[in-house]
Amino acid sequence: MASKRATSGTIFNPSLKHLLPDPLVLKDMGAAVARVAAALEAGEAVAVFGDYDVDGSASSALLSDFSPRLACRHGSTFPTA
């Protein structure tokens, strides 16, 4: 976040685009995006794996909720203890 430059526009009109880092800087995110895109184009099912903490549960729920909007067959699972 320190690399993002604060301007009056970003301070007085905050948005997630300006507050969150670029997700493509995460390791292998580009490959993951390409694989999901290929699965969608091929009509393959996509699995959503989540975990029990708040961010894992919330992100899994968001992906599961969004998947049908992409006409994507999907399944969700959480690890057992």
Image: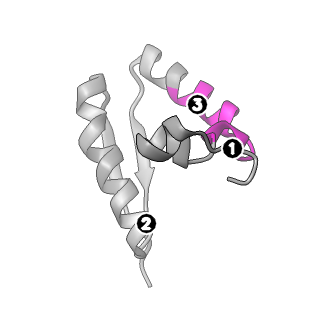
Is residue 19 found inside the magenta-colored segment of the image? no
Q: Residues within 10 Å of mark 1 (few under 14, many from 20)?
A: few
Among the two numbered marks 2 and 3 on one chain, the one whose residue lies closer to the N terminus:
3
Report how far apart the C-alphas of labels 2 and 1 lie in the structure.
24 Å
Occupied quadrant, residue 69: top left
Residue drawn at 39 percent across, 19 percent down: 43
Q: Indicate left or right for 80 with 9 as reference.
A: left
Which element carries disc 3, helix, strand or loop? helix
Magenta-drawn segment = 22-36
Question: In x, y percent, where is residue 57?
Answer: 36, 65
Q: Nearer the viewer, residue 57 or 73?
A: 57
The vertical placement of 24 against 26, above or below, is above
Q: Magenta part mainly helix, strand or loop?
A: helix
Q: Quadrant of the C terminus?
A: bottom left
- Residue on which disc 2 sits: 55
Among the two numbered marks 1 and 3 on one chain, the one whose residue lies closer to the N terminus:
1
- Residue on which disc 1 sits: 4
Question: In x, y percent, where is residue 72?
Answer: 32, 28
- Residue on which disc 3 sits: 33
